[in-house]
Amino acid sequence: TVEGLLNFGPDGTVRLGTGHKDEDDEHEAEQERFMELRDLNGVLLYRNKRLGNWTLGGLPAPGEGRIGYSERSARLPDGSRIRLVSRIHTVGTRPTLIRLAHSEEPLWHEFGELLTVLLLGLPVALAVAGFGGYRLARRTLAPLDSMARRAEQITAERLSDRLPIENPHDELGHLARVFNDTLARLERSFDQLRRFTADASHELRTPLTTIRTVGEVRLQKEGNAEHYRDTIGSMLEEVNRLTGLVDDLLTISRADAGHIQVRLANISVLDLARESVALLEALAEEKGQHLVVEGGGGTVVYGDRLILRQALVNLIDNAVKHSPVGGRISIRVESRLGNEAVVEVQDSGPGIDPEHQSKVFDRFYRIDKARSRDAGGAGLGLSIAKWAVEANGGRIELESEQGKGCTFRIRLPLAHAQ
C-alpha cells in the first residue's frame, strides 16, 4: 500500500520507496495516479511527478480522511475528471493527509463511445426489432385471424360449421377445440328447440283442428239435443287434452328456467303411492284395470311431495294408457341397501323394444305416434317424470321386454341417508 512506502528522510522530506532509492524514483505502482501529501495544517509535504504543479486541495476539509477513507469526484485545473480518495495516516510520528486520485477520463471516454453507439445504433436496432416483431406477430396471429374470420361466418343457420384445427396440441388448437365443442352444444340446443317448437305446434294444432272440425260438421247438420250434447262432449274432451298439453308445456318451461321451487320435507313413499293411485283409479276402472299398491310403510324420503306425486301420477297414467283392458298395474315400494327407496310401476302392456328405451324420456317422443295421440298422450309425461325425480336427487330407470310389459323404477335416497 502507499502508506507502507512512505517515510521521512534525514532532511525531513517525505520519500516514497524502500529507502534504498533516490527520492525521485517513485514506485511504479504510483505512475498511473495523482498523489499529494499535506500535514494537518495544509502544508504541502509531497506531490508526485504526474501531478506536477497542480494541487488536489489545500487544507483538509472537516472530517476528511479521519474515519476510514473519504471519496469524492473532482476536477483538475485542466478540467479533467478525477476520483479522489483521502485518508489521514501517521507517517513516522506525524499525522499526514494522503490524497490519491486517478483519472476518470478513460472511463468517460468509453462511456461517450458507448453513448454514441447507443444513439446511433439504438434507433436502427429498434427499427429492426420492431419490423421483426411485427412480422413475427403477424405470422403468429395469422391462424387466430383466420379463426376469427371463420367464426364470423358462423350463424344460427350454419351451426354445423367448425373451425379448422391445424395442431390440436398447441394453445390455438385447444382454443379451436373448445370453440367447436361450444358450437356442437349450441347446435344440439338449437335442434332441440326447433324440434320442441315443431312438436309443440303440431300437438297444439291437433286438438284445435279436431274442435273446429267437430263444430263445423255439427253446424252443417241439424240435430236434436242429444246430438249437440255428444258434439259438445267431444269438443270438451279435446279441450281437456289441450289443457293438459299446455299445463305440461308450462311445467317444462318453468323447470328449464329454474322457476319451480323444491320444498323438501319427510315423505312416506307408501302414502305417496296410494295418493297417486287414488287420483287415477277412476281412469283405470273405465278399462277394468286393477291398480295394486304393495310394500311397507316405513320407507321415508326427503323430497317435494307435489313434485314426486306428479312423477308417480305420470308413470301410473302411462301404465294405464298402455295396459290392456282388464290388465294389472302394480306399484311396489321398498327400501334397498339401507339407503335407497325404490318405487316400481309395472304394467301389463306390450313392452318397449330396446331401440326405443333410451329415448322414451325425450320430450314429445312416442313409439307409436298414432296410438299415443288416440290415447291422449303428447310424449311429455315421462320427460316430466324424469325431471321431477332428478329434482329430488333421484334417478329413474326403465326395464322392459317386448310383449312382457314395462317396469319404471324410481330410486330416491332415504331421509336418514341425506
Image: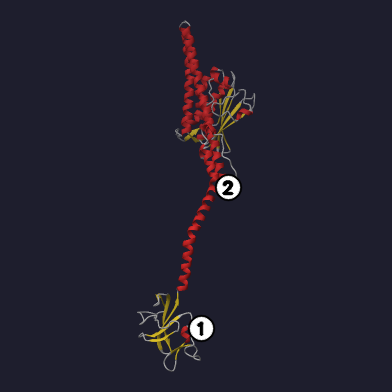
Q: Characterize the local packing of mark 1: few (<14), some (14-19) or many (20 or more) Cα atoms within 10 angstroms.
A: few
Alpha carbon of mark 1 to alpha carbon of mark 2: how far? 66 Å
Task: Relative to 98, say whether 393 is above or below.
Answer: above
Task: Select label 1 or label 2 by which is in front.
Answer: 1
Q: 79 above or below 114?
A: below
In this figure, which residue is indicated by the disc labeled 1?
28
Total numbered labels: 2
Q: Is there any visible trace of residue 218 in the rendered image?
A: yes
- Provide the secondary structure element on which disc 2 rests: loop
Where residue 113 sits in the image (x, y, percent)?
48, 67
Q: Position of residue 175 (x, y in %)?
A: 54, 44
Which of disc 2 and disc 1 is earlier in sequence? Answer: 1
Residue 385 visible here? no
Residue 132 numbered tag: none
Name the image quarter holding residue 179.
top right
**Which residue appears farthest toward the bottom when viewing the image?**
10
- Residue 239, percent across and down? 47, 18
Q: Amino acid at mark 1?
A: Glu
How far from the left and from the top, in percent, is residue 335?
A: 56, 35
Residue 170, disc: 2
Colour logic: secondary structure
